[in-house]
Image (tube, rainbow, N blue to C red):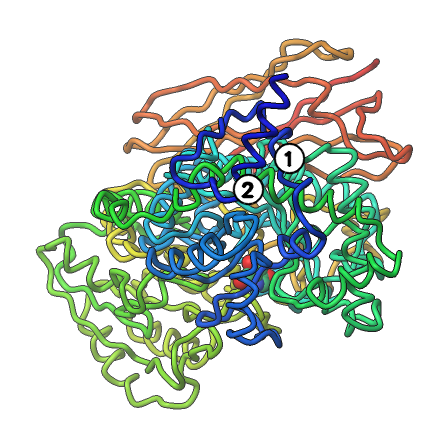
Amino acid sequence: MKKLLIFMSLSLGTMGLYSQNSTIPSSVKNVEAKVDSVLNLMTLEEKVGQMIQYNGSWDLTGPASETGNKQKEDRLKKGLVGSMLNVLSVEATEKAQKLNMENSRMKIPLMFGYDVIHGYKTIFPVPLAETASWDMEAAEESARIAALESVAEGVNWTFSPMIDISRDARWGRIMEGSGEDPYLTSKVAVAKVKGYQGEDLSNPKTIAATAKHFAGYGFAEGGKDYNTVNIGENELHNVILPPFKAAADAGVATFMNSFNTIDGIPATGSESLQREILKGDWDWTGFMVSDWGSIAEMIPHGFAKDKIHAAEIAVKAGSDMDMEGGAYEAGLEKLVAAGKVEEALIDDAVKRILRVKFKMGLFDDPYRYINSETKKNVPYKEHMSTARDIAKKSIVLLKNENDLLPIKTSVKKIAVIGPLADDKDTPIGNWRAQGEENSAVSVLEGLKNANLDAQITYAQGIKLGMGERSFLMPLKINKTDTTGMGEAVRNAKNAELVVMVLGEDAFQSGEGRSQAKIGLAGLQMELLKAVHKVNKNIVLVLINGRPLELSWSSENIPTIVEAWQLGSESGNAIADVLLGKYNPSGKLPVSFPRAVGQEPLYYNHKNTGRPFSAEHVTYAHYTDIENGPLYPFGYGLSYTQFDYARPELSVESIKSREKATLSVAVTNSGDRKGKEVVQLYLRDLVATTARPVKELKGFEMIELEPGETKTVEFIINEEMLKFYNASEKWEAEEGEFQLMVGGNSEDVQSVKFNFSN
Ligand code: NOJ
C-alpha cells in the first residue's frame, strides 16, 4: 500500500508537481522506488536524453561538438538533456534549468558539472602540490571550500578528484593527480570525496564528486597525453585500481572514464573495467560519465566505425552519459529500434543517473543549488587564510646548505630575481576554474608583505610573455631575450642573499601539456648560472606543476625550495617558509629524476633479476648517471632534524586475523618545533608474482618540540599484505615480509616478520 502511494505521488510529480514545494519524501531509503517510478513513465527518447551531457558553449575544455546552440536549447526544452558542463553563475544555470523544467514533459532536473580541480575562486595548491602536504584534513577542507564556492555559482558537480597514478614527469597532467603511490592517492581520494560531498549529497553546500579517469590514463606511453597504455592485469589491479576502489567505497557519486586504450581496448568501451569490475565486483551504484567526446573518439582509435557503432560499444560497456560527444544522441534510439541494444541497458544507465539526482535532492528542488543568496554568505576571506595555510604545508624543502634558510634577521640586502618572482599568474596553475588571471600573491609581494628589516631589490632577468594566457595557448618563458640579465646579475652582486624564483609557467603542465624536456625552460638555466657566478648564496624557489630535472641546481645551488603552483596565497605561504614562520613539513609525492631519460621513475618498482652489481656492467641501470632518483618519493627536509630509533615489532609472526604492532620512536634533535611524516613501507619477499621493492602502507604526521620524542605505532595485519596475485585474487600470501620505517622512501630501517594462514 505504502509503495503504491509513493508511486502515485511520483506519477503526479512527474506530471508537473516536481517543484520547490514537492511533497515527495527525500529519504535515501526510498530512492530506488522513486527512481523506478520515474523511469517507468519515461519514453525511450527521454531516457536517452538523460544520457546526454552538453557543454554550455562558452567555456570549451575540449573540441566543440557538432550540436549547435539552437539545437541544444530545443533539446533542453524537450527534456532531452541530462546534464550540462561549463555553465557557470546562478543566472546561467537558472536559465538552463528553467528551459528544462518549464517546458519538458518529465521535468527531470539537470546537473551542472565543471572542472573544479583545486578550488573554484579561491585557488588552492595544484593537487600534486597539495598531496605533498600529506595532510588529509587539508585535502578534505580545500574540497569542502571548493564545493561551497561552486554552489554559490550554481555548479553542483565537479569532475574531481583525478586519481590517476602517474610515474612520468613528462605527462602534463601529473600536476592534477596525487603522484606515483596508490596508497597515498587512495587516502587523498577519500578525503576529496568527503570534502566535496560531505555526509549528505542533498546538502546544498555540497557537490557531487567524480573519480577520474577510469582507468590507466596516467600510464600514457612516453608520458604523451592521450597516448596508448600497455599494462598488464598485475599493474592494473595493484597500482591503478586501488584509489578508484577507495573512492567507490567512499561513495563517490560519479566516475569518468578515460581517453586511452588499455591493451588495445579504449577504456570508454571497456566492459571489463566498467561493467565487470566497477559495477560488478565493486557493486558501485553511481553513474559513469564519458570523458569529453571519448565515446566518439573510439572512431579514430579504430575501434568503432561510426558514432552509432561507438554508442553501441560504449553503452554495452557501461558508459552512462556522453559528454559533448554526440554519439548517444546519434545512435542510442536507433540501436534499440534495430534490436542491437536492449532497452534494459538504457534503463540501467538512466536509473544510475536518476539515483544520483535523487540523492542530490534535485527532485525535491531543482533550484536547490541555484540561489543568489548563497554567494553573499560565502566567507571568501576566511577561505584565503585556509589557502595560505594549505599552501605553506605543501612546500617541500629539497636542500638547505650553508644555513641560508630560514632567512636571518641579520641579512639586510636581498635580491629577488627571476621571471616568476613577481608573476601573479603562474601560481594559479592550470585547471584554475574561476581563479582570476594574475590574482595570486607573488613571491616578491609575499616577502614585501612580511615587512622585513632588509632592502629588497627585484629583477625579472628573463621576460615572460609571447602569446596570450589561456587554456588553449600556453605562455612560454622567454628563450631569446637576454636584455634583463645584466640588471639581475648586478642586483645579485650587491646582495647578501639571492632569492631566485624559477620553474614553469602556469600552462606548461595540465591537459595536453606533455613535454619531452623537463628542465628549466627558456633562458632560466643561463640566468641561474650567471647569477651563481657572482653570488653563491642562492635560495632557489621553484614554481612548477611536475617534477623537474634539477641535477645542476642540486649540485651547485645550496638551497632549493619546491614551492609548486600553490594557488591564490602562494607568495605569502612561500614567505612564511623562507622566513621560518612555518617550518617546512612537505614530502614529495613523486620521485624527482636525475635526467628525463629515467622516466617513468617510481620508488615502488620491482627488483628485476639484476638489481645491482658493483663489479659488472650487466645489471639494471643507466651507465651515464647514478641509479635512482635525485630526490626520492616521501622526501622533504625540515629546519629541525628527526632521529629515528630502531623500529620494534610486538610479535615476529602473525596469522590471519591477528595483528602486530610496529613501533618507532622519533626524536626532534634540532632546536625548532617541527612536523615529520613518519612513513611505513612493506615488501613481500617471495610471492606468486614479483612484488615491489617497497610499497607505502601507512603514514602519520607528528609534531615535536625540540628534544621531544614520540612513539608512532602502526598496526600490521593481513589486510595490509594483500595484493592481486597469480590466482587473480586479492589476498595475502604466506611467507616472510620486510617492514621499513623512515622519513622518506630511501632512508629507512627495516625489520622482518612472517605471515601464515
Ligand atoms: C577532458 C578532461 O580529460 C577531463 O578530465 C575533464 O573533466 C573534461 N575534459 C571536461 O572538461
Above or below: residue 60 compared with residue 545: below
Residue for badge 2: 14
Q: Which mark is residue 37?
A: 1
Give the position of the N terminus as an image quadrant: top right
- Badge 1 local density, few (<14 within 10 Å), some, or many (20+)? some
Secondary structure of the residue carrying numbered label 2 = helix
Q: Residues within 10 Å of mark 2 (few under 14, many from 20)?
A: many
| Residue 583: image location, x then y, percent | 31, 40
Name the spot of residue 726 as percent of width and height, x first.
Answer: 90, 35
In the rendered image of this protein, does residue 355 appear above or below residue 553? above
Q: Amino acid at mark 1?
A: Ser
Inter-mark Cα distance, 2 to 1: 9 Å
Q: Position of residue 242 (x, y in %)?
A: 68, 38
Q: Residue at x 43, y 34 (%)?
A: 22
Q: Do residues under tags 2 and 1 come within 8 Å of each other at their CB atoms?
A: yes
Does the Cβ of the disc 2 residue fall within 8 Å of ligand 1?
no
245 and 310: which is toward the camera: 310
**170 displayed left or right of 452:** right
